[in-house]
Image: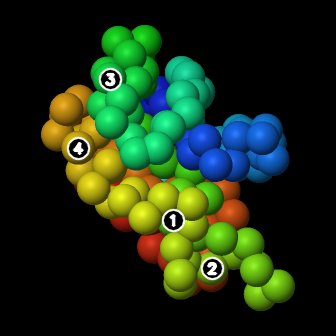
Amino acid sequence: MKKIGIIRCEKNMDRCPLTNCFRSLKNKIEGFKIYEDCELMGVFTCHCPGEKTEDLAKILKAKGAEVIHFCTCTFAKKTSEGWVARDGGFCENINEIIEKVHEATSLPCVKGTAHLPKGYELQTW
């Protein structure tokens, strides 16, 4: 069973209780379709500009996380067309943050949870 850590964005934490991220993980769909079986180990919120995210990820790893997913809202946004990656989400530095987390933890880091934009292929560091 793959043990998952999730990192979300502070800019969405007052609007999103992660309902669809948790549903997607439970049902192994969207960003979690790559796993036969998975369980949540913990969730942290990244605060701009992301300087503590590596430390948060190390805590998730210490708690048993084997992979870290970054919420879709960090790189995509909801429009009348559905979720789209063009024009970005809440974080303009998400790729750099993911790279730093991957380097600091040596864990696979996946960009995407729920609400994946149409045609989006999961990116893993």
Q: Residue at point 28% right, 39% down?
A: 101
Secondary structure category for the residue under label 4: helix
- In percent of width and height, residue 29 lies at 65, 55
Q: Which residue is mark 3?
A: 55
Q: Residue at point 54% right, 21% down?
A: 41
Whether the residues at callouts 3 and 2 have beta carbons within 8 Å, the answer is no
**C-alpha span from label 1 to label 2:** 9 Å
**C-alpha span from label 4 to label 2:** 25 Å
Secondary structure category for the residue under label 1: loop
Secondary structure category for the residue under label 3: helix
- The earlier-in-sequence mark between 3 and 2 is 3
Q: Quadrant of residue 117?
A: bottom right
* Label 2, residues with CA under 10 Å away: few <14, some 14-19, many ≥20: many
Residue in front for this viewpoint, 113 or 77: 77
- The earlier-in-sequence mark between 4 and 3 is 3
- The earlier-in-sequence mark between 1 and 2 is 1
Whether the residues at callouts 4 and 2 have beta carbons within 8 Å, the answer is no
What residue type is disc 4 on? Answer: Lys
- The earlier-in-sequence mark between 1 and 4 is 1
Left or right of 30 on screen, residue 58: left
Looking at the rendered structure, which numbered label has been put on residue 75? 1
- Residue 1 visible, this orientation: no
Q: Which residue is mark 4?
A: 100
Above or below, 8 against 41 in this view is: below
Q: Which residue is mark 2?
A: 84
Q: Residue at point 36% right, 29% down?
A: 52
- In percent of width and height, residue 86 lies at 53, 84
Give the farthest residue toward the top.
Answer: 63
What residue type is disc 3 on? Answer: Asp
